[in-house]
Image (cartoon, rainbow, N blue to C red):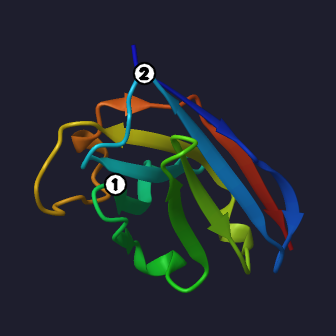
Amino acid sequence: QVQLVELGGGSVQAGGSLRLSCAVYGYTFRRGCMGWFRQAPGKEREGVAVIYTGDGSTSYVDSVKGRFTISQDNSKNTVYLQMNSLKPEDTATYYCAAETAARLINNCAVVAGRFNYWGQGTQVTVSS
């Protein structure tokens, strides 16, 4: 059984930083996709960033480019989301997700329907 456990949420002032972690159990990174999504109250879930675990290549939604960094640590089976220069509009519950099917090329995308395992979410609140 695959389980994803997120840690690292919290409250921070605008301009601050947080690092989220997602520990993965029951699945070893093997040319799949790991993603971060977020959902604010009253809004749809949106993709934030994705990493292809085969080679570590990444992709981001435009609103976080240059501020957020997704990374992986294969030795810890963990994915991170470093969030810098946080803005109040980044306030949301953040979810880690795994798309475990292996692929030979990077076709990862921040499309929620493609991910088959999800974490429980961690709250991030940014105050102005």
Residue at the (50%, 56%) spot, across then down: 72
Of residue 119 and residue 13, the one placed in the foreground of this image is 119
Q: Amino acid at mark 2?
A: Gly
Q: Is residue 39 above or below residue 48?
A: above
Q: Residue at x 38, y 28 (%)?
A: 27
Q: Quadrant of residue 16?
A: bottom right
68 lies left or right of 20: left
Q: Are marks 2 and 1 in contact (CB under 8 Å)?
A: no
**Would residue 123 appear left or right of 66 to someone viewing this image?**
right
Along the line of sight, the residue nearer the viewer: 81 or 26: 26
Neighbours of disc 2 within 10 Å: few (<14), some (14-19), many (20+): few
Viewed as shown, does residue 99 lie left or right of 126?
Answer: left
Q: Which residue is mark 1?
A: 53
Residue 41 visible (yes or no)? no
- The x and y percentages for residue 24 are 50, 33
Task: Specify the farthest residue to the left.
Answer: 104
Q: Secondary structure at mark 2?
A: loop
Q: Percent x, y for residue 43?
A: 50, 50
What residue is shown with label 2?
26
Q: Is residue 93 above or below residue 69?
A: above
Q: Could you say which quadrant of the image residue 109 lies in?
A: bottom left
Asked if residue 99 can be seen in this view, the reply is yes
Which quadrant would the N terminus be assigned to in this image? top left
Amino acid type for the residue under numbered disc 1: Thr
Give the image location of residue 95, x and y in percent: 53, 42
**Which sits in the foreground, 22 or 49?**
22
Residue at the spot x=80%, y=63% of the render?
A: 126
Q: In terms of image quadrants, where is residue 66?
A: bottom right
Vertical side of 6 occupied by 94: above or below:
below
